Image (spheres, helix red, strand yellow):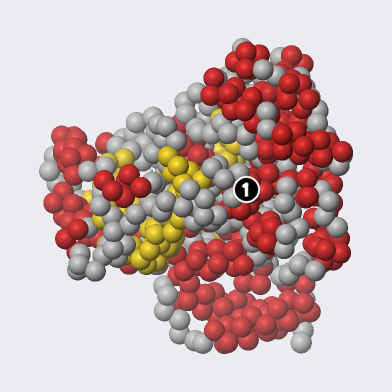
Amino acid sequence: MDKQKAQEQINALKEVLNQYSYEYYVVDKPTVPDAEYDVKLAELQKLETEYPELVTADSPTQRVGGALLGGFEKVRHNVPMLSLSNAFNETDLRDFARRAENVLGDHISYVCELKIDGLAVSLTYEEGKFVRGATRGDGTVGEDITVNLRTIRSIPLTLKEKETLEVRGEVFMPKASFDSLNKKREENEEELFANPRNAAAGSLRQLDPKIAASRNLDVFLYAVGEWKNSDLTTHSARLDTLKSLGLKTNPLWKKCTTIEEVLDYVNHWTTERPNLPYEIDGIVIKIDDLNQQEELGYTAKSPRWSIAYKFPAEEAMTKLTDIELSVGRTGVVTPTGILEPVRIAGSTVGRASLHNEDLIREQDIRIGDFVVVKKAGDIIPKVVRSIHEKRTGDEVEFHMPEKCPACGADLVRLEEEVALRCINPNCPAQLMEGFIHFVSRNAMNIDGLGEKVVMQLFNAELIHTMADLYRLEKEELLELERMGEKSVTNLLNAIEASKQNSLEKLIFGLGIRFIGEKAARILAEEFGTMEKLQEANYEELVTIDEIGEKMADSIVQYFSEEKVSKLLNELSELGINMEYTGPKRAAQSADSIFADKTVVLTGKMESLNRNEAKEKIESLGGKVTGSVSKNTDIVIAGEAAGSKYDKAVKLGITVWNEEELIEALKD
Ligand code: IVH
């Protein structure tokens, strides 16, 4: 075939493939079987292999490109990407309408749209070609994530007309894709995503577009940034035109002419929300007429012509089928509700916290009850109350046992505590939790020793004390199920490496009551060696800033136990470092970029773990805290950064990505 013929065929194939994609991904009405698409794509691929000079960026074969090496470039938005002010109830919505009417009179049309819970993006098309895609970033500067956005099949690489415009929307992960992604991650023992939004954000932050391509992301476009040649005068006309250009808009928007109609729409979707195949977190209301929009104008952060109604924290009702008891590291016995699986705020929930027996009594929660479950902080579900009206009479009252469910020892209620505790120091459940804590990231950080492996080691009686971990032999590990040569070698290397940890990790790992990570570091810095800490008395301890009476008591009590000195001797003989090797506080550089800065870490980092990042920042004089507030100076957002990132952007706080952090640490 000559080149001209090939070009003609390539053009024809591209056109038909784009049309198939549009039907399948944008309007959800495929006209041909999937196999037909695959055959045509293969034909195109074959021609492009023969004539590589005819491959263009908008070819359907070019959705997945090569990985980025240097991270994402920054992109300045020509028109800032603003956020919206929020409404939480009917009054807020009526106030919004009243303010608009005060300026515009009462001839106002509103467009109500679903507020998609994903990640805001900006897509730029030049003469109909998709040339750039960016994140919102801080609203002024975002990141160029074109390579990842190209992998989303519902984002057309070519529009149906040669328009030049910048259009905005939300990339999201459908609920079903999120479920299967997390299921796969669970099977591979990978960390799970908390909700579809985090999963979508995490996928778009990947430097390798192959990952984004595998994640089944989707998009809805809902706003225009810049569109110079458009003479449209309403938002609703824009939505229609975007759709006819081949851009995917959400079909469930509605034009309303009164605030009553708006409230009906809000109420309708508040109830129908669980039946949608994607997550929404509210309703966006926009004034339809673009001239009226201009007349109302903007505040510094958001338009006055639009408002976002936010749904209250999602609750769901389901049946409490059982109550399970678990024994924590410190012996506290906690009841967990087993539920008929129910979907709440982005994931399926089958277990929820019941706190303690008092709550069960106060609320009279019984096994078999219908209960209301809510996600606290949108992550950990908890049972809020039971619905007594739905009782059939078969419900069973629950009583906390008198004996530990793991070891059978008596449970006690310590003074001033609501919780019941097993105080048997040899309780297997506590020991196991203790091991899990000892090897965890923030403690001895032994990679490859997750909960499951610890359980295997414990059940095979290979570990009785922490010291036994350092006596594990290759042969005995190879006998365990699912432990191959490679994983055993990796595990032994990780165990060996943990011997060099600085003292604070060991102190924290021991699991002394009331001694968290921060206290462990203070103690390590203050005493320098385990030996000195072991010898410290109560008076010495309480004089240390940030070490309170309860902590001091607990430390003295812990080190007075004979089995503790025995364990520490053994660990020392096995070569575990017993000294503080971190930076001295006094040695902190005053002119470090982190000096006196409050830093929040969020999301997952590729090249260093959160704890390492924290240690480094602290060693340079920074303070690392857990939540973003107006006092935060820098937020470092790794992969799958979620609400903390959003909050930082909202508050206008400097946000760095991992590469920027690494650069700063180098400096
Ligand atoms: S309009 C200037 N419409 O919600 C107005 N936003 O809280 C631009 N969002 O940053 C936004 N669905 O990420 C608009 N149908 C929708 C939306 C929507 C989700 C997100 C978007 C925005 C945030 C505002």
Quarter of the image with the C terminus in it: top right
Question: Percent position (x, y) of residue 553?
Answer: 58, 23
Q: Residues within 10 Å of mark 1 (few under 14, many from 20)?
A: few
Q: Tell whether circle 1 marks a residue whose Cβ is less than 8 angstroms from ligand 1.
A: no
Q: Which residue is mark 1?
A: 426
Direction from residue 620 to residue 220 in the image, left or right: left
Question: Percent position (x, y) of residue 458?
Answer: 69, 58
Direction from residue 543 to residue 650 in the image, left or right: left
When asked about the image quadrant of residue 272, the answer is: bottom left
Q: Nearer the viewer, residue 494 or 298?
A: 494
Question: Percent position (x, y) of residue 63?
Answer: 63, 66
Q: Nearer the viewer, residue 251 or 335?
A: 335
Q: Nearer the viewer, residue 277 or 572?
A: 572
Residue found at x 16% / y 38%: 98
Question: Percent position (x, y) of residue 659?
Answer: 70, 40
Regarding residue 252, the answer to whether it shows in the image is no
Q: Nearer the viewer, residue 611 or 164?
A: 611
Q: Amino acid at mark 1?
A: Asn
Direction from residue 110 to residue 481 in the image, left or right: right
Q: Is residue 333 above or below residue 645?
A: below
Residue found at x 48% / y 43%: 421
Residue found at x 32% / y 46%: 359
Residue found at x 50% / y 23%: 631
Quarter of the image with the N terminus in it: bottom right
When asked about the image quadrant of residue 324, the answer is: bottom left
Total marks shown come to 1
